[in-house]
């Protein structure tokens, strides 16, 4: 049971990191190059947020 709760918590926080990263990336992309920059920034932000969250769990 404890392993299931830990896995669910890690998944939720990783998803939160991806969403926050996506939002920040989209905002920066929009500021630099509206339109296409928004999409590119979002995808880079999601990737960075996901990787950062996963790295934080390995500490």
Image: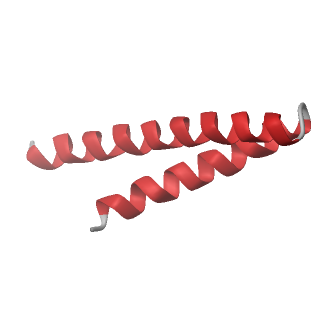
Front residue of 24/6: it is 24
Front residue of 7/15: it is 15
Q: Seen from this angle, which residue lies furthest front? A: 31
- Name the image quarter holding residue 54: bottom left
x, y percentage for residue 17?
Answer: 46, 43
User: Looking at the image, which residue is at 46% across and 57% down?
Assistant: 52
| Residue 59 in the image: above or below residue 21 | below
x, y percentage for residue 49?
Answer: 52, 49
| Residue 25 in the image: above or below residue 53 | above
x, y percentage for residue 47?
Answer: 61, 53
Q: How many marks?
A: 0
Q: Seen from this angle, which residue lies furthest left? A: 1
Q: Is residue 11 left or right of residue 25?
A: left
Q: Is residue 1 left or right of residue 58?
A: left
| Residue 23 in the image: above or below residue 14 | above
Which quadrant is home to the N terminus? top left
User: Looking at the image, which residue is at 73% across and 40% down?
Assistant: 28
- Name the image quarter holding residue 42: top right
Q: How are the colours assigned in the image?
A: secondary structure
- Name the image quarter holding residue 46: top right
Which quadrant is home to the C terminus? bottom left
Q: Is residue 13 left or right of residue 26?
A: left
User: Looking at the image, which residue is at 54% across and 35% down?
Assistant: 19
Front residue of 7/48: it is 48
User: Looking at the image, which residue is at 89% across and 40% down?
Assistant: 33
x, y percentage for residue 7?
Answer: 26, 47
């Amino acid at each position: 049971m404890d392993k299931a709760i830990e896995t669910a918590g890690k998944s939720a926080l990783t998803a939160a990191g991806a969403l926050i990263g996506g939002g920040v990336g989209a905002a920066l992309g929009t500021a630099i190059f509206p339109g296409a920059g928004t999409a590119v920034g979002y995808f880079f932000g999601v990737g960075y947020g996901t990787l950062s969250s996963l790295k934080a769990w390995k500490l």
